[in-house]
């Protein structure tokens, strides 16, 4: 079958889904998918509206059926879906009922292999049961942890004879990989649906599929580990806080150099108020790009100044965060060094050597351990635990991408209350 570009409309608002679909169809999308969130929020009317507007396009209903297969497939097909999705972890009885119902109503079944333990074996089994398509699917939450579908996709396409769809964070850079791995249907969600210009985004993916040459994408690219610093540099502290479920900030810290941004793994320092010995010693222990996070009790005198800043810059540090006082603020601003602190004072302390380097510290209720990732800008300072750094860097990118779409809608004449559908989603 000719490669198909399928757009997953995973929205909870039908109006936005239809607007994005209109833009994406202009960019070359072949199939339109009423995503599970859309069907749950808007019901079968979402399928009807999509089919009514684009009668010549194949409409996919991502029902994720787990039980009552005959009923769910029948109602989706009657609403206008030509392809209906059932979960591969459903029972054989449910999948067979879905296939039988689809035949009765002129539809086809795609079996979604999300969370199936032995994907190849299950794909062969559902092909035998009469499924028309198999879907290889890396769930969104797994995408955030860096998981990709390519290895599983290759194994399945080599094992089955029916067309295989693939979904899982695919964009204009990775769409050629999907086809090279044997996919017939490339399912794209956020790389089109969150784009400020969905027409251009769809066109870029389509071009990549037709030429098998990746088209570079600024957004919708996920961190894999070594690129954490570069990816975090694209987002804001506010994006990170939203990704961390509106948490993760260290209260009371402000930039001494307005407009500066700080990103890097933490080297922690615990010292006594005014004792600048350990903070200065930590400069020599830090690696290039590290961020010193200094707990000085949140009070004066200063434990950092212009000479320490010059030393840190010579060592290539990414910045300094101080729960306590700094001084020489004018000099530090002129140097452009990213420094965040809770106090400024002209008075320095004495180097007595108390404290520790490389131990967990607790600052204003926030725990910071060595290796945790720090991101700071004019809004303040956020910390991402080291073990969650990959996942929440990707989630922060996801927040930024969604905001880009909303910003475009506001600039097009809407208001924030309208694009957020406040009246609809207010708690009652």
Image: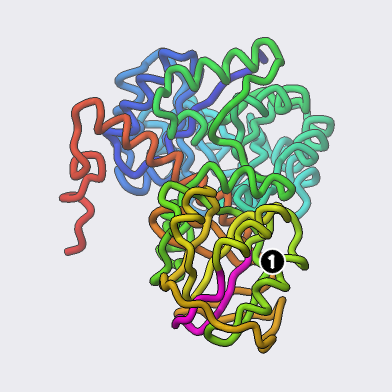
- The color scheme shown is rainbow
Reading the image, the residue beneath label 1 is: 371
Against 310, residue 1 (above or below) is: above
Q: Quadrant of the C terminus?
A: bottom left
Q: In the image shown, does 99 or 309 lie closer to the viewer?
A: 309
Q: Position of residue 79 (x, y in %)?
A: 35, 32
Q: In the image shown, does 395 or 231 lie closer to the viewer?
A: 231
Describe residue 394's horizontal placement relative to residue 24 as left or right. Answer: right
Q: Is residue 91 visible?
A: no
Against 424, residue 62 (above or below) is: above
Describe residue 158's horizontal placement relative to residue 281 as left or right. Answer: right
Q: Residue at x 68, y 68 (%)?
A: 267
Against 325, residue 197 (above or below) is: above
**Farthest top residue?**
211
Q: Position of residue 381 (x, y in %)?
A: 47, 62
Q: Which residues are magenta?
A: 292-304
Q: Is residue 167 visible?
A: yes
Q: Quadrant of residue 50?
A: top left
User: Per the image, is 300 magenta?
Assistant: yes
Q: Position of residue 181 (x, y in %)?
A: 78, 28
Q: How many marks?
A: 1
Judged from the image, the secondary structure of the residue bearing numbered disc 1 is loop
Q: Residue at x 29, y 28 (%)?
A: 49
Q: Position of residue 407 (x, y in %)?
A: 32, 35
Q: Residue at x 45, y 39 (%)?
A: 401
Q: Quadrant of the N terminus?
A: top right
């Amino acid at each position: 079958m000719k490669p198909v570009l399928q757009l997953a409309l995973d929205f909870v608002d039908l109006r936005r889904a239809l607007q994005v679909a209109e833009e994406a169809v202009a960019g070359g999308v072949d199939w339109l998918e009423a995503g599970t969130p859309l069907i749950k929020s808007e019901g079968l009317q979402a399928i009807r509206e999509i089919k009514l507007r684009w009668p010549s396009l194949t409409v996919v209903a991502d029902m994720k059926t787990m039980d009552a297969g005959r009923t769910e497939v029948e109602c989706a097909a009657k609403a206008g879906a030509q392809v209906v999705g059932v979960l591969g972890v459903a029972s054989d009885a449910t999948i067979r009922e879905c296939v039988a119902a689809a035949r009765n109503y002129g539809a086809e079944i795609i079996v979604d292999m999300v969370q199936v333990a032995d994907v190849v074996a299950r794909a062969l089994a559902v092909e035998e049961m009469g499924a028309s398509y198999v879907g290889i699917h890396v769930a969104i939450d797994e995408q955030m942890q860096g998981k990709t579908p390519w290895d599983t996709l290759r194994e399945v396409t080599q094992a089955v004879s029916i067309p295989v769809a693939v979904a899982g964070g695919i964009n204009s850079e990775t769409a050629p990989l999907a086809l090279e791995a044997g996919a017939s249907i490339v399912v794209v969600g956020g790389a089109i649906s969150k784009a400020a210009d969905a027409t251009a985004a769809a066109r870029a993916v389509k071009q990549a599929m037709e030429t098998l040459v990746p088209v570079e994408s600024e957004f919708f690219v996920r961190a894999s580990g070594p690129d954490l610093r570069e990816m975090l540099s694209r987002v804001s502290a506010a994006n990170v806080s939203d990704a961390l479920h509106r948490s993760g900030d260290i209260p009371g810290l402000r930039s001494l150099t307005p407009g500066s941004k700080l990103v890097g793994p933490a080297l922690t320092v615990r010292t006594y108020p005014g004792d600048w010995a350990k903070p200065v010693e930590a400069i020599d222990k830090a690696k290039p790009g590290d961020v010193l996070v200094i707990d000085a009790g949140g009070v004066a005198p200063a434990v950092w100044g212009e000479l320490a800043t010059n030393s840190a810059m010579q060592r290539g540090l990414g910045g300094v965060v101080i729960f306590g006082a700094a001084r020489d603020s004018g000099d530090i601003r002129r140097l452009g060094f990213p420094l965040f602190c809770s106090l400024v004072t002209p008075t320095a302390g004495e180097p007595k050597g108390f404290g520790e380097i490389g131990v967990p510290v607790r600052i204003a209720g926030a725990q910071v351990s060595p290796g945790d990732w720090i991101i700071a800008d004019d809004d303040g300072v956020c910390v991402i635990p080291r073990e969650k750094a990959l996942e929440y860097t990707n989630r922060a990118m996801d927040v930024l991408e969604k905001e880009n779409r909303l910003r475009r809608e506001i600039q097009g004449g809407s208001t924030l209350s309208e694009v957020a559908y406040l009246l609809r989603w207010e708690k009652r």
